[in-house]
Image (cartoon, rainbow, N blue to C red):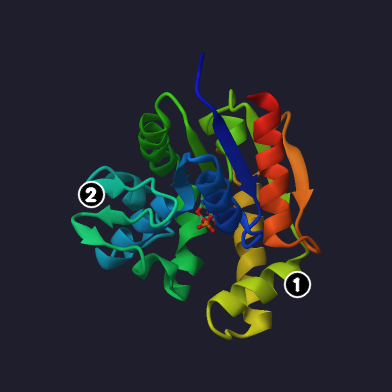
Amino acid sequence: SAQLVVAIDGTSGSGKSSTSRGVAARLGLRYLDTGAMFRAVTWWLLREGVDVHDTDAVAARVHEPAILVGTDPAGPGIMIDGVDVAVAIRTDEVNAAVSPVSVVPAVRSRLLELQRDIIGSGGIVVEGRDIGSVVWPDAQVKVFLTADPAARAARRAAEEGGSDLTATEQSLLNRDQIDSGRATAPLVRADGAVEIDSTTASLEEVIAQVVGLAESVE
Ligand code: C5P
């Protein structure tokens, strides 16, 4: 029988990464951060001087760089074109460019193939926007994680060491709007996904809830 796949989708800053890593660590599973893959491609396009709003230019270049993604929940790591970009993909510049890049079908199809290869026969927690709907619709556990925008912005600003709250919230909402409105693999709650609102829940509570879902299907 297929090994467990836990799909965790949701809005920007809803706590997907902390939750996914915590669940993977608790259950001894691998972890895949698909957002990091879109961020790495975006970082590389910016470095190459490609106009990220020019769909044809983005599509023409996306197959060039080698992409290597780790799956250890304690420190997954990501390299593109031989460069370790784990830190570089978290800048405001990448935040602002990643959703426009992620709209481009050629970007999505290249990363979809890589994501399915990495998921392989399962035993993994995968976070993103379209995991339960497109990447792995057969996932035994699907979660749609949300939280109020103000709560998401407060958490993200704290992680970033005191960024401006209003600007952080605006950046999250801009990404949500582009991610939800795109034609290919938009952010949606997948069929069968359990919605968890983390506005008032602690990280430990959300992790425990997802672990409970995973244990109930095993
Ligand atoms: O999860 P994270 O905030 O790092 O994702 C960054 C961006 O990558 C998202 O805002 C979205 O535009 C894109 N993304 C996507 N599909 C995924 C994961 C991320 O389009 N499965």
Residue 119 numbered mark, or none: none
Q: Residue farthest to the left?
A: 82
Circle 2 crowding by C-alpha within 10 Å: few under 14, some 14–19, many from 20? some
Q: Earlier in the sequence, mark 1 or mark 2?
A: 2
**Relative image position of residue 196 (x, y in whole percent):** 76, 48
Which secondary structure lies at badge 2? loop
| In the image: residue 11, left or right of residue 3 | right
Which quadrant of the figure contains the C terminus?
A: top right
Residue 4: x and y, percent? 54, 28
Which residue is most to the top?
1
Neighbourhood count class around disc 1 (C-alpha, 10 Å): few under 14, some 14–19, many 20 upward: some
Q: Residue at x 26, y 54 (%)?
A: 80
Residue visible at 51% across and 48% down? Answer: 25
Question: Horizontal placement of 75 versus 27: left or right?
Answer: left
Question: Which secondary structure lies at badge 1?
Answer: helix
Residue 65: mark in rendering: 2
For the residues carrying marks 1 and 2, which lies nearer the camera in this image? 1
Q: Nearer the viewer, residue 100 or 56?
A: 100
42 up-or-down from 102: above or below: below
Q: Which amino acid is tagged 2?
A: Pro
Q: Nearer the viewer, residue 64 or 79?
A: 79
- Could you say which quadrant of the image residue 163 lies in? bottom right
The residue that label 1 is drawn on is 150
Q: Amino acid at mark 1?
A: Ala
Can residue 128 be seen here? The reply is no
Q: CA distance from mark 1 to mark 2?
A: 37 Å
Residue 104: x %, y % from top left: 45, 45
